[in-house]
Image (cartoon, rainbow, N blue to C red):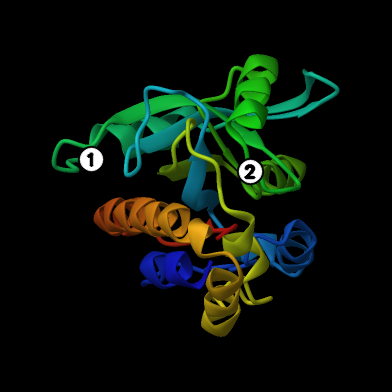
Amino acid sequence: MPREARIAAGPGMAVICAASNPEQLRLQLGRLDPARVRGIVSFGVAGGLDPALRSGDVVVATEIAIAAEGKATARWATASMLSETLVAQFDLGGRKITQGIIAGAEDVVLHPHDKAALRDSTGATAVDMESHIAAAYAAAIGLPFAALRVISDPASRALPELALNALKPNGDVDTWKVLRGIARKPSVLPQLMRTARDFNQAIASLRRCRSLLLESGSGLVPANL
């Protein structure tokens, strides 16, 4: 997403922003020159799968997993030294920092029951739409990989379809589409407000993570915002 990309940008960083579009991310990664990259970091927000995590809590991946038909079908380990560095140096003012599996999904996981099913099949603590793509790319070309994700929507929270339908191709929100949706269905407003509050809390934590990401070494690519 554009806001995540702006947070990640800095000296020594090549930032790829795919706006939650898996195919676009694959295309952009395919254009990278591996010789100019020291490692890949998946950096952004995620949906919560572990009920103990709240908006703004941080997950550093030990592994990336994808699932089909109720079971994990592929897994990628993260670079332990890079992941441990990310965990060891954080001070996020009381926010929980945990290590765990991050699940990759090709589509948005909207509902709590779908989140629970994904947790059961993968053992994951969080889900995003990009880390599995970045992990597969890093493994294919022999680069170290790490993933740092901040929880936006907790496991118990459903995402309103209006919020997803109002996203532009570049990841920005179409404000007029949101307003028209609220006018047609005013009852969705409280859910939209909760979603916005969750996202803002996640973005605040992500900003606090930024300095560590920049200190972890030039040539790292936040590959999947």
Say if 211 sits above or below 112 in the image: below
Q: Residue at x 57, y 53 (%)?
A: 160
- Disc number placed over residue 77 in the picture, else none: none
**Along the line of sight, which residue is nearer the eye, 25 or 188?**
188
Could you tell whether 49 is left or right of 162 in the image? left
Kind of residue at badge 1: Phe
Say if 68 sits above or below 128 in the image: above
Label 1: state its secondary structure.
loop
Q: Residue at x 36, y 27 (%)?
A: 98
Could you tell whether 15 is left or right of 8 in the image? right
Locate residue 83, reporting x and y percent: 42, 34
Label 2: state its secondary structure.
loop
Quarter-of-image position of residue 91: top left
At label 1, counting other C-alpha atoms closer than 10 Å, the crowd grade (few under 14, some 14-19, many 20 or more) is some
**Quarter of the image that includes the C terminus:** bottom right
Locate residue 134, reporting x and y percent: 66, 49
The furthest residue to the right = 69
- Disc number placed over residue 90 in the picture, else none: 1
Residue receiving disc 2: 110
Q: Earlier in the sequence, mark 2 or mark 1?
A: 1
**Along the line of sight, which residue is nearer the eye, 28 or 160?**
160
